[in-house]
Amino acid sequence: MGTAWRRAKRALAANLCVYIPGNLDDDGGSPFGGHAAGRSSNAAAASSPTSSGGVSDYRELMPTTPTPTSSGLRLPRSGSRSSKRTCAICLGTMKAGHGHALFTAECSHTFHFHCIASNVKHGNRVCPVCRAKWKEIPFQGPPYSEHPHGRARVNPVNWPQEEGFMTVVRRFSRADSANRQHHLTPLFHTSEPIYFNDDEPLEPSDEPLDLQPDTTRDSQHGRSKTVEIKTYPEFSAIPQSASQENFTVLIHLKAPHPSTNQVSGRNVNPNSTASQTSRAPVDLVTVLDVSGSMAGTKLALLKRAMGFVIQNLGPSDRLSVIAFSSTARRLFHLCRMSDSGKQQALQAVNSLAASGGTNIAEGLRKGAKVIEERREKNPVCSIILLSDGQDTYTVTSSAGGTLQAQSHYESLVPSSIRGATSHQTPVHSFGFGSDHDSSSMHSISEISGGTFSFIETEGVIQDAFAQCIGGLLSVVVQEMLVGVECVHPGVQLAPIKSGGYASKVAADGRSGSIDVGDLYADEERDFMVSVNIPPAHDEFVLLKVGCSYRDPVLNETINLEGKELRIPRPAVVVGQMMSIEVDRERNRVQAAEAMAAARAAAERGALADAVSILEERRRILSKTLAGRSSDQLCLALDAELKEMQDRMASRQRYEASGRAYMLSGLSSHSWQRATVRGDSTDSTSLIHAYQTPSMVDMLERSQTLSPSPRLLNPPLRPARSFSAQLQLR
C-alpha cells in the first residue's frame, strides 16, 4: 500500500485532492500531508432532523455560522479539534473510511471537497471560516464517462466508486488576484437562465390520501375537521317595538385542526410519507438582502436562520433562494428539499457574501419571476423577504414622510403576487435592524396579503422565520369566501369591518361577502357585521352565514351551509348585558384604528398628538365591559398601546424603532395573524395573541436548538380565543 501511495503522490503532485482508501483508520493520517486527506462526510449533513427532534442531530446539519453571544459572534478557532473533525460548510463530520475527499487550504482549514468545490463554483475564493484569500482553489473535473480520453479519474484498485469525478486544484493567476473588485460579489456573475421554468418536478404521490371532508369531530381531540362558524349578536334579544340601527353581529371562524400525523417540526420525521400526506406542500421563495450592511453578525445569523428553514422543510416542499444587493441573483432553482436538495441549499446559502447597495425591488422582481415561470405548482406558495436597509435604487424617500412608500411600491410589486385573493402570493416581509425602510416593507406585505415583522434584535431572526414557516407548513384552508345573507325582509347590511380582507355589500343591502383567503391550522378570524333591524313581534332569523373554501390537501372545494342566527323579540327586555365577545372585538378594531391615527400624526411631526390619541384609547378601553373584566385581549391591547407611546417619546426613538413597531402591529391586526415586533418582553401576551399551535411548536424547536435570550421566549400557548377562560369564571 505504501508503494501505491508513493506512486500516486508522484504522479498527481502534492496539490491534488484524491480519494483515500477506505481502510485507513482515524489515527493513521494522510500520506499527502496538509493538502489531501480522505475522510468521510457525514451523510447527516443533508438529512432531516430525526423524529425525536434531537438537538445534536439538528446542529450537525446547520450552516457554518457562529452562535451569537452578548459580546458578539464566537468564531471557531482555526486550530480547534472540532473544526478538524467537522466540515465548516455542511457541518458534517469528517471521518476516515468512506472515501470522500477532503480539501485543506493553505490557511489550514479543511472541508469536504464537494462542499468547498460547490462554494467556489458560486464564486467564493476566500476561506469560509477565516476569510483568508486563497492562491489555490479546488474545482471539479467532468465525470469519468464524459472525459474524452477516459483518464480524468484517478482511482486505484479497491477505491470507492460512488463519486464519478476527479478533484484538482487550480492556482490563481496574477490577473485573478488583481481583479479584487469582481471577487466582492462573485455570486452575481455566474450565468442564469432567461426563463425560470427549470423548477424541479413535484414528487409523485406514492399513496392515495385516505382523507375525506366531513363535518364530524375528531373523536380523539374533540376538534372539528372543517371550518367552524359561530355568530354572536351584540344583545341576545331586542324588544318588539324597537328598531336597531347598526346592530352588531360578530362572525367567528376557526380553521380545522391539522391531521394527527401532520409534521409539527418536532415530533414527526418530515421525511416520512405520513407527515407529507397530511399537509399541503409548499413552494417557498426567500428573497434575502446581502448588501454591505449585512456583513458580519447579521449575515451569519441569517445563514443560520436559513439553515433552520431548510432543515424543517419536507421532501415535497420546494425552495428557491434569491440574494440581492445592488442587483439580484437566483442562487438555485426551485427544488425539492430532499436530502440532496437540502445539502445543495445549505451550500448555496453558505456561499453568500455581503457587499454592494440595496435593491429591494429587483430582488422582489426576481422572486416573483421564479413563481410566475414555474412549470408545476405546489398547493401553498409564499415569499419571505428580509432586508436591513432602504432601497437606494428604486424608491426615493419623500421629506419626512414614508406614507408615500405604498404608492411607489404598488407599481413595483409584480402583479402575480398582488392579484386577486385566489391568485396572489403573500410576501411576508421582515425588517431587520433600525435602518430598514419599514414603510416600504410594510407596504409590500400589505399589497400582497402578507405580514410585516420588525426584527429589532439580531438574535431573533431564526425565531421570526420559525414562526412564519410554522404557519406556512400548516395551511388547511385556501380561497375562503364567507357569505352573509339577510333572511328577514326588513333587515339590511351596513358596511362590513374586515381589516385587510376585501369585503363587499350588495347594492340592495341584502347580502355581503368577505374574502378571507388562506387559514393556518387552528387559526381564527373575527369580523363585525352591522345590520339595521326593524320592529317585529315574533322571533325571526336575522342572518345566515356560510362559507366555501378549498382544501389544499384534498384539492376539493368544500361548501358549508349557512348558519342561522335567530333573535328573540319579547315585549320587554330587562337586565340585558352586551356580548363580551362583541365588546372584545370592538375594542380590538378601535385600538387598531387608534394606532393608524397615531401613526399618521407622528408622520406629520405631531408626536404629542400621537401620544394623546393612544392615551385616550387606553382610557376608553379600561372602561369597557371587557376591560373591566380583566379580559386577556384587552390587557394585551393596553400593553401594546403603552409600548407604542413609549416608542414615541422622541423623534429619534420613533425613527429608530417606533415606526417599525407600529407598522408591525398594524399588520398583525389587519390580517389577524402573528408577527414579530421589536424586542420588548413586557408585551409578550400581545405578540402571542394570534399564534397558532403549529407556530408555537416551531418556535419551541427553534429556541431549543439555539438557546439564547429571545424576543419570543418563553413561548406561550395561543391566547387568541378567550371564551374558555370566561366560562371558567
Image (cartoon, helix red, strand yellow):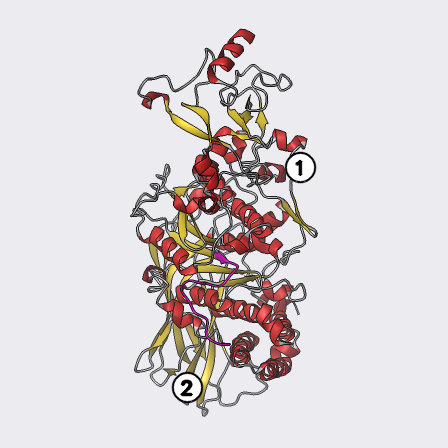
- Tell me how far mark 2 sits from mark 1, CA to CA: 75 Å
Whether residue 699 appears in this view of the structure is: yes
Residue type marked 2:
Ile
Contact check, label 2 and label 1, Cβ < 8 Å: no
Residue 422 at what x, y percent from top left?
Answer: 34, 61
Other-residue count near label 2 (Cα within 10 Å), few / some / many at <14 / 14–19 / ≥20: many
Nearest the viewer among 55 and 549 is 55
What is the magenta range?
Answer: 386-400
User: At 34% from the left edge and 76% from the top edge, which residue is drawn?
Assistant: 511
**Residue at point 45%, 85% (across, down):** 246
Q: Is residue 702 magenta?
A: no
User: What secondary structure is found at the residue carrying circle 2?
Assistant: strand
Q: How many marks?
A: 2
Is 396 in the magenta? yes
Residue that mark 2 sits on: 533
Q: Report the front residue among 696 and 29.
A: 29
Q: What secondary structure characterizes most of the magenta part?
A: loop
Q: Quadrant of the C terminus?
A: bottom right
- Residue annotated with mark 1: 77
Q: Which marked residue is nearer to the observer: mark 2 or mark 1? A: 1
In the image, residue 343 sits, relative to residue 712, either above or below, namely above
Which callout, 2 or 1, points at the residue further toward the start of the chain? 1
- Residue 498, image x, y percentages: 44, 73
Q: Nearer the viewer, residue 596 or 73?
A: 73
| Image position, residue 3 (x, y; %) | 53, 7
Please identify the quadrant where the N terminus is shown.
top right
Residue 544: x and y in percent read: 38, 73
At 66% from the left and 32% from the top, the residue drawn is: 79
| Amino acid type assigned to the residue bearing label 1 in the image | Arg
Relative side of 467 to 498, left or right? right
Q: Which mark is residue 190?
A: none
